[in-house]
Amino acid sequence: MNDLMQTFNQLSEYQQKQLLAYADGLLLQQKAKKGDGDLSKWKENILNVSTWSENDIATFEENIKGMDNWKAPQW
């Protein structure tokens, strides 16, 4: 460990900052969770966030059907 500190202290201030930023990046990668490819838990969490009721969704779907009938105003 002492060798590491001696080497670090020999670097310029700019190089020390670069090395610390690199080390921070490595720590973030280490902490990041690896996905297992199973999206079912993620989908379940997203579905639980929604506050729309079945009536709200039915209203949206009904309005979507009428969008094709809209006419742009003529100038």
Image (cartoon, rainbow, N blue to C red):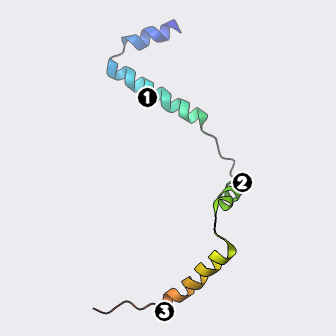
Q: Amino acid at mark 2?
A: Lys
Q: Give the structural element (helix, strand or loop) at label 3.
A: helix
Residue 63, disc: none
Q: Is residue 66 left or right of residue 74?
A: right
Q: Is residue 28 left or right of residue 49?
A: left
Q: Give the structural element (helix, strand or loop) at label 1.
A: helix
Residue at 56%, 35% (x, y): give it. 29
Front: mark 1 or 3: 3
Whichever of labels 1 and 2 marks the residue nearer the N terminus, that label is 1
The number of discs equals 3
Tell me where residue 65 sits by quadrant. bottom right
Q: Residue furthest left?
A: 75
Whichever of labels 2 and 3 marks the residue nearer the N terminus, that label is 2
Q: Residues within 10 Å of mark 2 (few under 14, many from 20)?
A: few
- Residue 54 point in image, percent of width and height: 69, 75
Front: mark 1 or 2: 2
Tell me where residue 47 sits by quadrant. bottom right
Q: Amino acid at mark 1?
A: Ala
- Residue 70 point in image, percent of width and height: 45, 90
Q: Amino acid at mark 3?
A: Asn
Q: Is residue 32 left or right of residue 12?
A: right
Tell me where residue 12 sits by quadrant. top left
Which sits in the foreground, 47 or 30?
A: 47
Q: Residues within 10 Å of mark 3 (few under 14, many from 20)?
A: few
- Residue 74 point in image, percent of width and height: 31, 93
Residue at 71%, 54% (x, y): give it. 41
Gap in angstroms between the C-alphas marked 1 and 2: 33 Å
What residue did someone put label 2 on? 41
Front: mark 2 or 3: 3
Gap in angstroms between the C-alphas marked 2 and 3: 39 Å
What residue did someone put label 3 on? 69
What residue did someone put label 1 on? 21
